[in-house]
Image (cartoon, grey):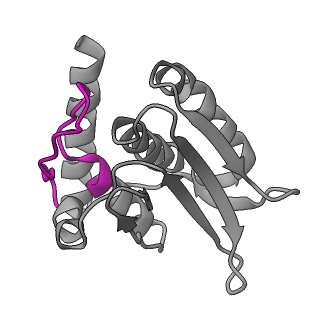
Amino acid sequence: SGKHLLEIINDMLDVARIEAGKADLHEEDVRIADTIDGVAKIMHRQIERARLTLALDVPAPAPVLRADARALRQILLNLVSNAVKFTPEGGTITIGVRQLPDAGGIALSVSDTGIGINADDIPKLMKPFAQVHNVYKRKYQGAGLGLTLVRSFAELHGGQVKLESTPGRGTTV
C-alpha cells in the first residue's frame, strides 16, 4: 500500500510539473531494447500473478533513440500496468516497436487481449484523474493519472498517443 501511494504521489508531481511547464527532459541515447527488457523485468511478477503472457515485438537490431530514459520507462510501465489490470487471466500483453520511415522516429505500442474500452470513453481517459467505470477492474485501481502521464511525456518528446480498442477484444496504445 505504501509503495502504491508513493507511485500516486510521484505521478501527481509529474503531472503538476508538466502542466506548469517545469518538466525537463534529460535526453540521451537510449537503446529501446534495454528499456523494454527493464520494464519486462519490473512487471514480471505482476504479469505472472495475473497469469498473463508477455510478448515482445522488437526488431533486430533494435533502434537507439534520443530520449529521456526515465520518461520512456514510465510510459511503458504505465501502459503495461494498465494492460495487466484490464486483461483477464490467460490473456496476452505485447510490447511492440516499429521504426517510422520519416524523421528516424519510432512507434512504441502496448497491446492486450483485455476487456477493451468503448469508443465514447477513450477521450475521457486522457484527462487527469479520469477512469472509466468497469466491473472488471482489479484491486489495483490507480488514480487515473497513467494515460495522462503517457500523453504528456510523449508530447514532450514531440510524439503523440493513439488508443484503439474493441470491447471484449483488447486495446492498443
Q: Indicate left or right for 113 with 167 as reference.
A: right
Residue 34: tell me if it is visible. Answer: yes
Whole-percent x, y for residue 156 in the image: 41, 66
Whole-percent x, y for residue 153 in the image: 40, 58
Q: Nearer the viewer, residue 82 or 148?
A: 82
Residue drawn 17% across the image and 39% down it = 143
Q: Nearer the viewer, residue 36 or 154?
A: 36
**How many marks do you count on the picture?**
0
Residue drawn 68% across the image and 78% down it = 100
Q: With respect to residue 42, does 152 lie above or below? A: below
Prevailing secondary structure class for the magenta stretch in the rendered image? loop
Residue range in magenta is: 127-148
Q: Nearer the viewer, residue 79 or 64?
A: 79
* Residue 172 part of the magenta segment: no
Q: Indicate left or right for 123 with 97 as reference.
A: left
Q: With respect to residue 167, does 144 lie above or below? A: above
Whole-percent x, y for residue 15 in the image: 23, 50
Residue farthest along the top direction in this orientation: 2
Residue drawn 31% across the image and 61% down it = 167
Residue 69: tell me if it is visible. Answer: no
Q: With respect to residue 154, does 129 lie above or below? A: above
**In terms of image quadrants, where is residue 20?**
bottom left
* Placement of the C terminus among the 4 image quadrants: bottom left
**In terms of image quadrants, where is residue 140?**
top left
Residue drawn 42% across the image and 58% down it = 169
Q: Nearer the viewer, residue 12 or 62?
A: 62
* Placement of the N terminus among the 4 image quadrants: top left
* Residue 135 part of the magenta segment: yes
Residue farthest along the bottom direction in this orientation: 102
Q: Indicate left or right for 51 with 153 as reference.
A: right
Whole-percent x, y for residue 24 in the image: 40, 55
